[in-house]
Image (tube, rainbow, N blue to C red):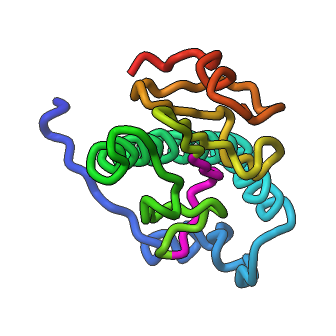
Amino acid sequence: MSILGLTKTRITAKQTGGTLGSSHKTLNENARPHAGYSLVELLVVVAIIGIVATIAVPNLLASRRAANEASAQSSLRTISSCEHTYYFTYGGNTSYADLSTLGARIMTDNVLSSGDKSGYHFEATPGPREYWATAFPITPDGLTQTGARRFAITEDGVLRGDSDLTRLPTDHTAILEIPPLGN
């Protein structure tokens, strides 16, 4: 007998007298309906969410701080531009202006006219033939930290910044001691 001459035949339960597979029940026939999730499944899901949050939350906070710092730097450059425009237009080449005189959208209480918070407190201090403007984080530490650096700019247009959040500069000389950012 050759292998090519063999044919496959299918044997059914009827041909075997109904005994083929009669002792084997499928898993679904014996199982009760699945009513919900087990406690272990829920704990695994909660653990996974906790791990993802542990990784994501610090990155989110760091990106928010970086965005606040970039916004503060941009606002200081805008204040500097407004100061120079005022100096040459209205100041008679002798005096600068404070923020309220400039009509700047950034108020000293750090609320923009649209009501948004930028995370930094701004001040501009005019003097004869000089000015300085500073940006200091509203919340300098903790979980809700809005910035990790302070910034300043003077009439020379050089943006300065460092991470010394313990003191706010009080005069022009103290501002010039802050290292330039390399703008």
Residue 105, image x, y percentages? 45, 65
Q: Is residue 78 above or below residue 46?
A: above
Q: Which residue is located at x 56 percent, y 63 percent?
A: 107
Q: Is residue 115 above or below residue 181?
A: below
Residue furthest left as drawn: 4
Position of 159 with respect to 163 (left or right) is left
Residue 32, image x, y percentages? 75, 82
* Quadrant location of the N terminus in the rendered image: top left
Tell me the magenta residue range: 115-124
Q: Quadrant of residue 155?
A: top left
Residue 68, image x, y percentages? 55, 47
Q: Is residue 111 above or below residue 31?
A: above
Position of 133 with respect to 14 (left or right) is right
Q: Which residue is located at x 62 percent, y 27 percent?
A: 172
* Quadrant location of the C terminus in the rendered image: top left
Q: Which residue is located at x 28 percent, y 57 percent?
A: 9
Closest to the observer, 134 or 38: 134
Q: How many marks?
A: 0
Residue 167, image x, y percentages? 81, 32
Q: Is residue 85 magenta?
A: no
Position of 168 with respect to 91 (left or right) is right
Q: Which residue is located at x 64 percent, y 75 percent?
A: 28
Q: Quadrant of residue 165?
A: top right
Closest to the observer, 54 or 130: 130
Closest to the observer, 39 or 127: 127
Position of 52 with respect to 116 (left or right) is right
